[in-house]
Image: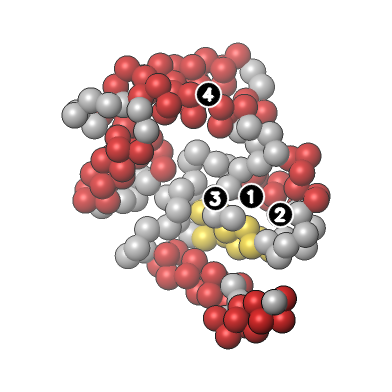
């Protein structure tokens, strides 16, 4: 899990200020998401990838525009804010690596600590990045790849597991 959250903002912070913020963001998205001018999408890009290069920001702005309609994007803002999967964390039985960027603005570090504390046997690794997910070119990206490579089974192990299961 990389910069994941089991609880949306309205679950972590169920107050009028958070509700107003989510509704304002959803309305901005609905009004401007599909426009050629990326200013509305840039609001999310700046939160998710503050240390991105100009090219990376432009690519993420375009990816957002292409990924869904303004109505769908607004709905996602509202629904993700209400997300609460915390009741199921204790039921997870698979090995879990929780990666979290220390400076992630959308998902606070406290949420990574919550995930790691509530998923049996989870391992938490904190990455030194201001981005939501480390971007290629920053040291945290190389560190993330090292951690994933060490965590995931090697291809020969996966093939042996498949042969054993079959």
Q: CA distance from mark 1 to mark 2?
A: 6 Å
Which of the marked residues, 1 or 4, is nearer the chain's N terminus?
4
Between circles 1 and 4, the one closer to the viewer is: 4
Identify the element where label 1 is drawn: helix
**Which residue occupies 24% across, 32% down?**
38
Label placed on residue 3: 3
Residue beneath label 1, please? 112
Label placed on residue 116: 2
Q: Quadrant of the N terminus?
A: bottom right
Verify CB contact (< 8 Å) between mark 1 and mark 2: yes
Label placed on residue 78: 4
Can you give x and y, in whole percent of width and height, for residue 111 in the image? 64, 44
Q: Quadrant of the C terminus?
A: bottom right
Residue at the far left: name it. 36
**Which residue occupies 34% across, 50% down?**
51
Verify CB contact (< 8 Å) between mark 3 and mark 4: no
| Residue 9 visible in the snapshot | no
Is 7 situated above or below 145?
above
Identify the element where label 3 is drawn: loop
């Amino acid at each position: 899990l990389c910069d994941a959250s089991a609880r949306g903002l309205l679950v972590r912070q169920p107050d009028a200020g958070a509700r107003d913020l989510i509704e304002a963001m959803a309305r901005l998205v609905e009004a401007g998401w599909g426009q050629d001018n990326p200013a509305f999408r840039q609001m999310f890009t700046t939160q998710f990838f503050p240390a991105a290069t100009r090219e990376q920001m432009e690519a993420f702005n375009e990816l957002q525009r292409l990924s869904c309609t303004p109505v769908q994007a607004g709905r996602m803002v509202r629904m993700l804010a209400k997300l609460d999967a915390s009741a199921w964390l204790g039921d997870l039985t698979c090995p879990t690596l929780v990666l979290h960027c220390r400076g992630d603005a959308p998902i606070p570090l406290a949420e990574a600590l919550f995930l790691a504390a509530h998923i049996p046997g989870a391992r938490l690794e904190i990455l030194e990045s201001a981005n939501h997910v480390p971007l290629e070119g920053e040291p945290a990206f190389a560190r993330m790849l090292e951690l994933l490579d060490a965590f995931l089974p090697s291809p020969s192990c996966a093939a042996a597991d498949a042969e054993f299961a079959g």
